[in-house]
Image (cartoon, coloured by chain):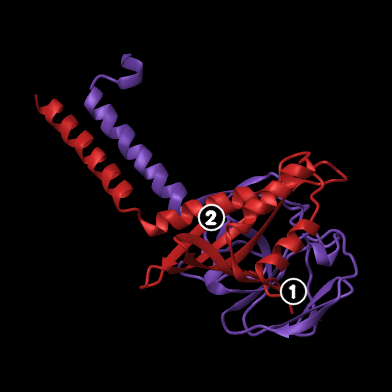
Chain colours: A purple, B red
Amino acid sequence: MSLLFGTNRRVTLIRAGVLAAAAALLFGFVLLPVRLQGISMLPTYQDGAFNFANRLAYLWSSPSRGDVVAIRMAGPRVLYVKRVVGLPGEHVEITMGVVTIDGQPLIEPTVHARAPWNVPGVTLGTDEYFVVGDNRAMPAQNHDFGRVKRDRILGRMLF
Amino acid sequence: MRVRTILIAVVSAAVALAAASWLWPNEERVVRHRLDDLAAALSVPAAEPDIARVTRLAQLRQFLSPAVVVRTSTQEIASRDAVLGAASQLRAGGAVTVSFVDVQVTLHADRLTADVYLDVKITGLDTRSGEPTVDAREARLMMAKENDTWVVTSAETQETLQRP
């Protein structure tokens, strides 16, 4: 029993309470646990992979190109996990599977295979990002991607 | 003695709270319960027999206003009969579970109408590979209390990621 509760049961209970509260705060508001479902982020993340969305990542900075971000829908329980390819104000286009930013092809080391996607060009607004998954081998119609407002990006994936 | 007093106070408060919520039901909670029931009516059990399917679609009728309008990115269906007709055409390959998550209910001042913003989560099995599948879409519903029952008057899916 002394192993479980230490020498002072009251102190141990307080310590356990503080620990539980800290964990609830940490995993409820700072590091959101995310279980990835689907194949749109292959090969970077496998279906069923576990990760955390770091909500502090963009507290003092903005998402950068190449960041893998968590995007909220109606709330934080269902999230999209996508990679940022286009930044505010940029013109994004996908031609034969190659992403171009302001007319220049984007080098994407995380994309291993490309289906011949053709997506008409779009100029992003001042608070818009263009996000897409790493699995470009799948048909474009089965892949959710596109423009997203900054306020929907909850954070960056931790690893 | 002190512990006993605290215990009695806690139990009394819980009983008072339960009685109050039973006597004066919170409309937001009623709407949420109604949405849970709607999700259950939309879910398809594995190997659903035809008679069960007809029963489920008949249950679905109770959740829709006669003038309901359902809009998706590709189509608009107006009227309850048309919506149920479209639903009857959908044939799931296996069990499909529909759930509403991140539900936000905003009651209007009249307390007879409400806006609902939620995610529709659909889980099932891929008919070819047998692998689990998950899809989710944002949706906005408008609900109204008709004949003392909350029904959906309009439903619209929203695209989180805007394709060019």
Report which quarter residue A53 is drawn in: bottom right
Q: Is residue A159 visible?
A: no
Where is B86 relative to A48, above or below? below
* Quarter of the N terminus of chain B within the rendering: top left
**Residue B132 percent across, percent down from the top left:** 75, 44
Callout 1 environment at 10 Å: few (<14), some (14 to 19), or many (20+)? few
Where is A63 relative to A46, above or below? below
First in residue order: circle 1 vs circle 2: 2
Q: Chain ID for label 1? A: B
Report which quarter residue A156 is drawn in: bottom right
Q: Which residue is mark 1?
A: B75
Q: Is residue A132 visible?
A: yes
Callout 2 environment at 10 Å: few (<14), some (14 to 19), or many (20+)? many
What residue is rendered at 67% in x and 62% in y? Answer: A82
Foreground of the two, A110 or B83: B83
Q: Which residue is mark 2?
A: B35
**Residue B162 percent across, percent down from the top left:** 68, 75
Q: Chain ID for label 2? A: B
Q: CA distance from mark 1 to mark 2?
A: 23 Å
- Residues under numbered marks 1 and 2 in contact, where contact means CB atoms less than 8 Å apart: no
